[in-house]
Amino acid sequence: MTKGALEYIDAAKRGETDPSKYLGKLMGKLQPQAERFNLFSCIALEPEAGKGAPLRGLPFSVKDNICVKGFETRAGSKILEGYRPPFDATVVERMKAAGGSFIGATNMDEFGFGTFSANCAFGAPRNPFDETRSCGGSSGGAGGLTAILRHHVALAESTGGSISCPASFSGVVGFTPTYGRVSRYGLIDYANSLDKIGLMGRCVDDISLALPIISGRDRRDPTSLAQPELSLSDEKIKSIAIPEELVPAVPDARVSEAFSGAIRKLQDGGIEVAKVSMPILKYSIPAYYILACAEASTNLAKYCGMRYGKAGTRYDKMYDEFFTEVRTQSFGVEAKRRLMLGTFARMAGYRDQYYMKALRVRGEIVESYEDIFREYDVIATPTMPLLPPKFDNICKMSPATVYALDFLTVPPNLAGIPQLSQPMAYVNGLPAGIHFMADHWEESKLLSIGRIWEAQMHYTFPLDLEGFS
Amino acid sequence: MIGLEIHVQLPTRSKMFCSCPNAVSDEPNSTVCPVCLGLPGSKPSVNKKALELAATAANTLHCKLLDRTWFSRKTYFYPDLSKNFQITQFEAPVGTGGYLDISGRKVRISRVHMEEDPARAVHDLAPEQEFSLLDYNRSGVPLIEIVTMPDMDSPVQAREFLRTLLDELRYVGVVVEGEDLKIRADANISIEGGERVEIKNVTGLRNLERCLDYEHRRQEKLSKARMAVKRETRSFDEEKGVTVASREKEEEQDYGYIFEPDLPVYDLKLLSGEMKFPMTAAEKAAEIEKRFGLPAGEAKALLLSSKPLGDLFEDIARRVEPTHVLRWLNSVVKAEHYKRPDVDLKKVAGEIERVIAAFAIGKISDSIVKSAIKAVFEVGTAGELVELELAGDALAVIIAEILRKEPHLVGEIKNQPKAVNFLVGRIIKETKGKYDAKRIAEEIKKAVEKS
């Protein structure tokens, strides 16, 4: 079984390793590898070793859209160049307080806009399993880093699948909590009603270690205040539902076969498996892109070359021309596409037809999941419908093709339910992930099914960097 | 016809979505934080007190309170807007469908909603300066916007409406003293046969009155000259006192409203059940009139002018004939209270009561009441003024009052006895010849010797 962060913490607890020495050694090994795979947007040059329980100096990385006090935080965008937040995000504050050592900000698609991290203004992170392939997106750097670091957790973020997708492509464990479980204070917004900060690690234990640290109410994020208490207790998983509309739509037979194999194993272990119908899910992709882009187009309005980030230069012009210059030069193509799409969807005359209708679809999707969870403990699908693609192929894909690839991860994100992606098979040396989902606030069921799966699955990683020796 | 959109700042301790103080600061950009500066990563959280005050305002204006109210984002690019969107309310404002009575007429209120104030921008500092300055101290200050139907027929009515509105809101604590200088409004005004003209961003009650007067006259002139009143947006030039056509384009702005996803939906019915709304001035006046047997409408003017005066009335009227109390509080006491806002009414309540009580039993005259109340506000006590009249000697009281106010006269008369004649002439004039000169001179001498 994979040993993750606990191996380090146990050693530190026994006094067998000194956190700052460990960190020093690790960073020396990490730097060239992280550069090779372009995993960091900004690496902490002389990281400070965290102190105290429970993390005892365990390294943690932060997706580039989560604010770290005084540390350049750019959300993968040129427009935020030079932005050093004067505050820590709540999750960063809590990780530091729990003894975590911050090691750097990981690369991502600009503002989270993408499936392959290829829309990162600072270059796409490359998959440590095969450098010609993507780590997935939008938390690609977090995925790649987790794949090469033995003792580490990554703070990542998902809007429509941005934790599960890179977990699947990078062959690691990705955990997206229920919307509202983890404070978003300090997260640079993509789509606030969908954004969730979550975790990546090498095993379920890594998740159960860090989840209670970052969870919990935060008065600075009112959407975090409604949560019931987090439970980590082991639960009996009796049944798994498989949405029958989704799996047959997977284009890569190697992925669907691996999934059938995984399900058979779980079934052999005594879990009831049933096919269920969720026809409303076919509207997920349009509903998601309308809502996410509508919100994103308001969130990105603030970037205007004033106050922080990239500064405008045309002070001789009127305000419109001033900010148009900065925005034209600094936003990437995908950001501009989503700005236009989102602005259109909320314009008077189109708002009812698109934005309001998408909200209604979202409501129905939530209900549809509620119906399933009344009868079943968890839902399972493959995480991504394909193996990590080559960059050569990615650049040939149209935006609509890329959007459609999110059909497995977008529905649970629209519903705000927790999700867990774990490696389920290796095809020609490339990882493929299985995606488990549970009802709102039932993170404990996901961790339980995750442990069941891990008991019979051997994970392999391309590199195993640590700071012991 | 006149319709108004009025912005009123709420007197909360902290701003609407962050814990920065909501206070006037001389130092620009000193009461700011990541939230009101809109820094990436920051998130708003609602100040519950602001929500309560907004609900109180809506309740005072007889609005329906929605059981579900939420916030929206109104997107437009402007340098004073830290996020380039404003958190406001669109579909579900705090209150809808209310009214306010003025002189027996109902002005309908279509909505009361909450929003955040943008920063303050200072343009055109000097002709040669090509930059503007921004002060974000105001960014995120809680506002309510009150939108009326076009139910006012004249600038006079609009003025009465605004004054009544401010009085009513002050009574329930939604606005504080001085808001009449800060109140901001957009006014829509049209006359028969003409198009609607919108005047944007007028600050202060006084300017609003001036601007409506001017615009009304302008439209009437055009109409008399048989010229069309164009549909347009104008602004008010405070210095010249005229409205001028704005350069702004006339097209409808599209704000692309979406729900504010960072903030939850609020149940106002629940909230208003938890918080007890204060009695409105109208309700309180009706109660007082009934309790003290006063004619309908008598108490309201007092309550609206100042809540402490209303409280004082309730207190004194329990022991002194209410009609007298009302009469004096509504006149001299009110005038002195306005003149000297620093005097704590509670501290002088006893003295005010002593004066009015003396009047009520016929002990002192109207003019003595006036002098005595003034003395109460000036030196904290009516002193002997109330007692002197008991001796039946009104002349002595008048003289004592003059010498108290102008103590230099005592010395002058002592040094230069002829100076008495000047004072004698003045008193004959003031008392309209009620006393003869010789007696006045004797009384003055007595008073001067005593002092």
Image: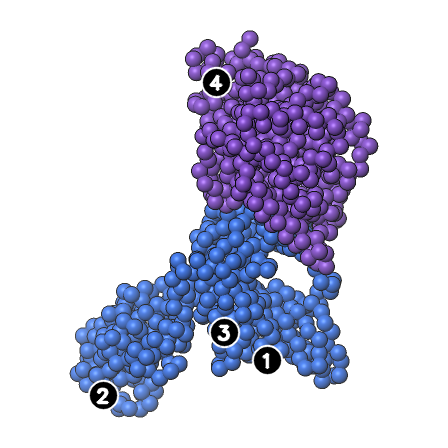
* Apparent side of residue B275 relative to residue A189 in the rendered image (left or right): left
On the same chain, marks 1 and 3? The answer is yes
Residue drawn at (47%, 65%) of the image: B57
Query: Which chain letter matches label 3?
Result: B
Query: Which chain letter matches label 2?
Result: B
What residue sits right under mark 4 in the picture?
A9
Q: CA distance from mark 3 to mark 2?
A: 58 Å
What residue sits right under mark 1 in the picture?
B153
Residue drawn at (62%, 49%) of the image: A364
Q: Quadrant of residue A243?
A: top right
Compared with A138, B410 (above or below) is below
Chain the render paints blue = B
What residue sits right under mark 2 in the picture?
B439
Q: Secondary structure at mark 3?
A: strand
Which percent across, then down, holds residue A324?
74, 46
On the same chain, marks 4 and 2? The answer is no
Q: Secondary structure at mark 1?
A: loop
